[in-house]
Amino acid sequence: MSSIITLEALEKILILRFKEGFLSLKDLPHPSTFKDMDRATERIVQAIENKEKITIIGDYDVDGVTSTTLMRLFFEEIAYEIEWIIPNRFKDGYGLSANIIPRIKGTDLAITVDNGISAVYAAKLCKEEGIELIITDHHLLPPEVPECYAIIDQKQEECTFPYADVCGAQIAWYLIASIKNALGIQMNMMPFMELTAIAIIADMMPLQHINRVMVNAGIEALNKSTRPAIKAFLEHAQKETLGAEDIGFFLAPLLNSAGRMDDAKYAVEFLASTNIYDARVRLERLVDFNNARKATEQEITAKALIQANPEDKVIVVEGEAWHEGVVGIVAARVARHYGKACIVLSDNGKGILKGSGRSFDSCDLFGITQSCRSCLEKFGGHQAAIGLSLKTENLECFKKQLQKNYTQGNYIKEETDRDIIGELHFKDISFELTDLVKKYEPYGQGNPRPKFISSNVEILQVGSMGKKGEHLRFSFVQDGIVMAGVQFKTCDVYEVGSKVDVIYTVNENNFRGNVTLQMLVEKIIQ
């Protein structure tokens, strides 16, 4: 049983998440602390002075899209024409690859954002074409790094930048700041911070240290933003302001859906819109992509859940022509359902399976898959998420090896939710509590929103809400104290009068100017 939580105890737990305390913008490290930042900056300034052709190469997720947009907007602001490319997930594959080189011929200087650290072969091709290459990336370094003019990646050993967990857009932001300084121009960096904040949240960076500072500053800038894309999104979401969770749950999936379903360039075009009319039309297209993504994902998740073997330590499922753009999300859904790491593969009918994996609990999915390299064609990622491809004939050997590696890793399945801070009694749910919780926002990766458990709670009322009745509204009572609660997206059935334990977060519900406290229910244990 969890210990009873008091406000003092809660504050102690939350404060421990911020070892350096709350930082501010003046604590941001100098751009020069990145290895090769000054070298890259000098080369870009030289390219501008010599009117060389510059091409930016991005990636199709939110981090890659925002990084590309940042670079595009910066060069637009200094009135220097550049080219930009985001590889197409289906035709080109990931990042700077051999497939992209024919499209960037004639470029004098190529700059990658949020990719490139493993592009050894493509870097060689650039050299042969006489294209000078600067790589900016934040991912782990492979055993062999590309040969190029400069590499800005905080994971390099010789890099003195003090924070390991930053995303591609943060590095792009720093590069812009560095070029601006070198050119000696006055420029407000806050409009660039808006987009950077979106990427930090979407790329699941821990919301601590400078990430917290940049997200807070970015959200503040977003809420004053004159950017047509942001205005169009607020209008669409029927919101006056945006918080970190609005970005994570609503804006990021929209931006991601372009690259998942068609081409990520549509997300860049949306973010870079110069008027509200274009922004609305482009947003509508992203909404369509996202609706298609949801439908496809639901259909494949249903098939994957049927096919999964719950006895396996790591679940591996495959299907014919499953949409490659959604297999990662399906893997996350299946992993959450079974409480186990999951890999979802799509058979393209040409003897190759391509897919994504998502971890669960303490399982290092990257580590255990890395040890199956001999069965794989391509592989990359990090501890919690991977991408891979293999020949169909190697599937059985891969599955066997994977289960064996998991067992050797001695992973212990966690029975309790680590994010539950403690037992909370209804008498302690107060505005004082929500004020304290607000103090440690924004919540997300590395700083999860505090979750509580209340035991021996009676369900007074329960009713469905939402267009399709997919959400539930509750009245709970504990020792004579009544609390309202909602549970989103659930098919579970509960009986009035039954005694349950409830796992939830607390929020303030603002309805027509009337602010009340409510429980956002995550799980009800019957």
Image: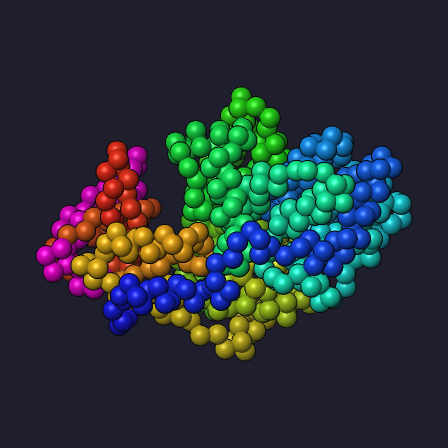
Residue 71, x across and y down, in percent: 68, 40
Q: Quadrant of the N terminus?
A: bottom left
Residue 182, x across and y down, in percent: 76, 45
The prevailing secondary structure element of the residues shown in magenta is strand
Q: Nearer the viewer, residue 277 or 399?
A: 277
Tell me what residue is drawn at x 69 percent, y 32 percent: 77
Q: Is residue 437 left or right of residue 165?
A: left
Tell me what residue is drawn at x 24 percent, y 48 percent: 517
Part of the protein shown in magenta: 454-481
Residue 177, x across and y down, in percent: 68, 45
Q: Nearer the viewer, residue 88 or 139?
A: 139
Q: Is residue 265 left or right of residue 158?
A: left
Tell me what residue is drawn at x 57 percent, y 23 percent: 275
Q: Is residue 197 left or right of residue 516?
A: right
Tell me what residue is drawn at x 44 percent, y 32 percent: 234
Residue 476 colored in magenta in the image: yes
Occupied quadrant, residue 376: bottom right
Residue 2, x across and y down, in percent: 28, 70
